[in-house]
Amino acid sequence: MTPEFSICVYCGSRPGERPEFSQAAQAVGQWIGSHGGQLVYGGGRTGLMGTVAEATRQAGGRVVGIIPKALVDKELANPLCDELHVVDTMHERKAMMGERADAFLAMAGGIGTFEELFEIWTWRQLGYHDKPTGILNTAGYYDGLLSFLAHSVREGFMGEWQMDLVRTGTDVPELLTALRAEVPLHPRDDKLSENL
């Protein structure tokens, strides 16, 4: 069965210290699966990654995992994915994730999650894709980052239009519904791998 939409979720390979983070990952996966969607993610079974993948699968959604060879053992590659792609490099992983998704969501995570969020955001401002991007700010996790980004705008290094390219929210159904509604009706044939 062809999924109605595909969303790439960036999140931690660790669960974090607060139960709210795992609860949010569970809610995201449940929403994707119950709405006939497909999850595209980093392909691991650990942390929030594993939680969102299993919740999507349990709710009837498709799961596409993309993981570089170097992380197959470290992040415990998920054999329960409908598709599990083992690639050579992180660049290949991120390009494939971007091409397979209609929208992007950053949840709580570490430096890898931050890097993925900022890269896909940069690609959008450069016109490499026109897909919506969101930040799920669970338990105030991104408050400091959002404050710093506002500071960057005030200091003249970013424009409000760049901030407008990313939607932020704390409510899972509300944010995911908004991202899905923003998916282009006729998306461009993005080849993000060509822009690396």
Image (tube, grey):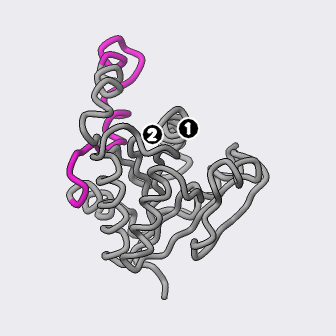
Identify whether 109 is placed above or below 177: above
Which quadrant is home to the C terminus?
Answer: top right
- Asked if one can make out residue 194 in the rendered structure from this viewpoint, the answer is no
Residue 164, numbered circle: none
Q: Quadrant of residue 162?
A: top left
Give the SS element for disc 2. Answer: loop
> Mark 2 is on which residue type?
Gly
Secondary structure beneath dot 1 equals helix
Residue 3, horizontal then vertical, whole percent? 45, 79
Q: Nearer the viewer, residue 167 or 110?
A: 110
> In the orientation shown, which residue stands out farthest toward the bottom?
1
Q: Which residue is at a point 31% across and 38% down the rendered structure image?
A: 164
Characterize the local packing of mark 2: few (<14), some (14-19) or many (20 or more) Cα atoms within 10 angstroms. Answer: many
Q: Which mark is residue 109?
A: 2
Residue 86 lies, with reference to residue 88, above or below; the image says: below
Of the pair 151 and 127, the residue shown nearer to us: 151
Where does residue 53 sit, x and y in percent of width and height?
47, 64
State the extent of the magenta-drawn residues as a range.
151-173
For the point 43% across and 45% down, which residue is it? 15
Front residue of 135/163: it is: 135
Task: Determine the CA span between mark 1 and mark 2.
Answer: 7 Å
The reply to whether residue 47 is in sight is yes
Relative to the observer, which residue lies in front, 145 or 43? 43
Question: Mark 1 touching mark 2, by CB under 8 A?
Answer: yes
Label 1, residues with CA under 10 Å away: few <14, some 14-19, many ≥20: few
The numbered mark at residue 112 is 1
Is 164 inside the magenta-drawn segment?
A: yes
Badge 1 amino acid: Gly
